[in-house]
Image (cartoon, grey):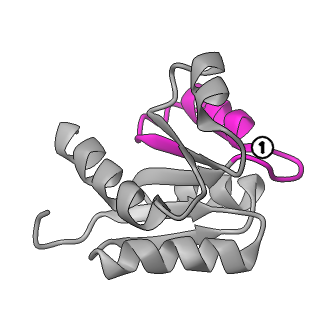
Amino acid sequence: MSDTPATILVVDDDEFTAELTGLILESEGYSTVLALGGLDALEKLAADPAIRVVVSDMNMPFIDGVQLFAELREQGYAQPFVLLTGDDAAPLMSAHPDLDAVLTKDGNLQEVLPELLESLLARG
């Protein structure tokens, strides 16, 4: 990673879960911005051009993670997009192959998410 930490937008309708995900990323040296739901995420992205990656929960009211991804791409945002789900990740990835990654929220998330972000940021 470079000297300036990459800014990651963490989107979740559950504030505790958003903060927990943020803590995982901050412990790995990333800077985080938290958004409580899809609508908040759209506002935060519009206000902060430094955001390099979006990490979003799947199941949220109003705008779910897949809808948020589609809306961002429609608006021209090209940042990597990682979807987190409490369900099995494979069917979501199969149904939406244009997503950069789908991860299951499980005990491995603390190791897997930072590694994934590092590889996504290295690509771009």
What residue range appears in magenta? Answer: 58-82
What is the x, y in percent for residue 106?
58, 59
Instruction: Classify the position of the C terminus by image quarter.
Output: top left
Residue 119 drawn in magenta = no
Instruction: Classify the position of the N terminus by image quarter.
Output: bottom left
What is the x, y in percent for residue 55?
52, 54
Residue on which disc 1 sits: 64
What is the x, y in percent for residue 96?
61, 21
Name the side, left or right, on which 43 lies relative to 48.
Answer: right
Q: Residue at x 59, y 29 (%)?
A: 90
Q: Residue at x 41, y 57 (%)?
A: 113
Q: Is residue 83 visible?
A: yes
What is the x, y in percent for residue 46?
56, 54
Name the side, left or right, on which 42 lies relative to 24.
Answer: right
**Residue 65 against residue 105 in the figure, above or below:** above
Q: Residue at x 72, y 68 (%)?
A: 36
What amino acid does circle 1 point to?
Asp
